[in-house]
Amino acid sequence: MKKMYKKHPVVVILTSIISIMIIGIVVLSTVLPKGNSSKTKDYPLYTVKAQADDIFKGNVIAKTSTDYREDASLDELSQVNVSDGQEVKAGDILLTYTKPTDDLSSQEFAIKGAENDLANAQADLAEAEKKDVKLRNDFNKSKDDSERQAINAQIETNHESWKAAQRAITTSVLARDQAKAALDGQKAKQTATVTSKTNGLVIMGNKSETSPLLSVVSRDTLVNGLVSEYDYDKLKVDDVVTVETIDLTKKITGKITYISPVPEKASSETAASQYVFKVNLDEHLQNGYTVQIHKLNETLYIPKSAVKKGKVYLKNGKNFDRVAVETKETTSGLQVVSGLKKGDKLIKEASDYVDTP
């Protein structure tokens, strides 16, 4: 080597420099990434996923429930026409009320008065007819002109009495018929009924000021849920949800049909406001069940550390692709607006990745 160096020093120096450069290139090629795509190293990865479902508490209730209380304005409750558990249809009689009989006495008195007047008028008419027969017989038997004139005058006077009796009969009959019609009308009004507004089952209550006499509840059910003020904006009318029984034996899909704009009465001044929302079910669920309402959360979140200069490093086979992603800050974390989908894998700590020029 010394001999070669002495004979060809330039060649030896150039050969050494070239060897060092080749070794450096080999080392750099194994250390530095190439362009926007690099072979996988042992970078910690993060799988893009949505947060867990939002879960709300709820109860299954009758879709319609109508209370019926005792109504004093209808006078005295005389009959409850249904029994506990009875199935009724809209229009079926539930309750019957009756007015006191004293309310009918005035019309009954008017009828009796008219009937008495009619009897008297009929008696007067009969008397006038009887007298007319007698007077005419006397007139025919009499031979004296002056006597006949006197009898004829009596006949005419009696005839006026007969006409008066006829008018009295007509008046009495009219008064009696009118009184009877009024009595019949009052008798119809004397009995008042309350009918069911809906189809359903009768649930008997307690006869008290604070509870209904009975209720009619539908067989059809819905879910009554509660959402706090913190999650209120997560729900929208027409959102599809899954309703699950507490024992996890049954899952039924449904749709939110109503969200109350007014909170329920708070249990304390410091308690968070609670709002009622209603879910129509695709299948029947037993009234009274306690359930959980699951709202699928499809919003994607990634750690802030995965983003560098608006881009993430997305695993693509054995390489990583630098991909632009749009995000926004939320209270739940960094939300993905666009650029990624559920299941994508990316480098969790983007700062660990060295970009090549």
Image (cartoon, rainbow, N blue to C red):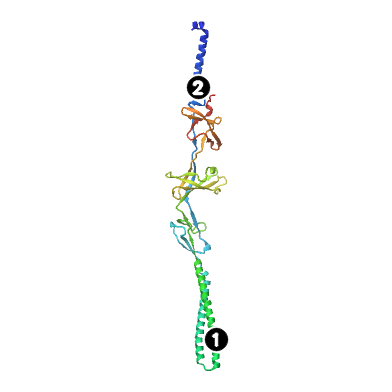
Q: Which residue appears farthest toward the bottom when viewing the image?
A: 144
Q: Between label 1 and label 2, give the one nearer the viewer.
A: 1
Of labels 1 and 2, earlier in sequence is: 2
- Kindly identify which residue carries mark 2: 31
Residue type at mark 2: give it: Val
Q: Quadrant of the C terminus?
A: top right
Q: Crowdedness of circle 1 by 10 Å Cα count: few (<14), some, many (20+)?
A: few
Q: Residues within 10 Å of mark 2 (few under 14, many from 20)?
A: few
Q: Amino acid at mark 1?
A: Glu
Q: Percent position (x, y) of residue 270?
A: 57, 45
- Residue 54: image x %, image y %? 50, 41
Where residue 228 appears, as percent x and y from the top left, is 53, 44
Does 98 sit above or below residue 233? below
Query: Is residue 300 depicted above or below 257 in this figure?
Result: above
* Disc 1 from disc 2: Cα separation: 148 Å
Q: How many marks?
A: 2
Dot 1: element: helix
Asked whether the beta carbons under mark 1 and mark 2 sit within 8 Å of each other, the answer is: no
Q: Residue furthest right?
A: 269
SS at circle 2:
helix
The x and y percentages for residue 41 are: 48, 26
The residue shown at (49%, 25%) is 38
Q: Closest to the observer: 356 or 117?
A: 356
Question: Vertically, is 280 above or below 39?
Answer: below
User: Is residue 290 toward the left or the right of residue 328 in the image?
Assistant: left
Q: Which mark is residue 222?
A: none
Q: Which residue is mark 1?
A: 156
User: Considering only vertical position in the picture, is 184 above or below 143?
Assistant: above
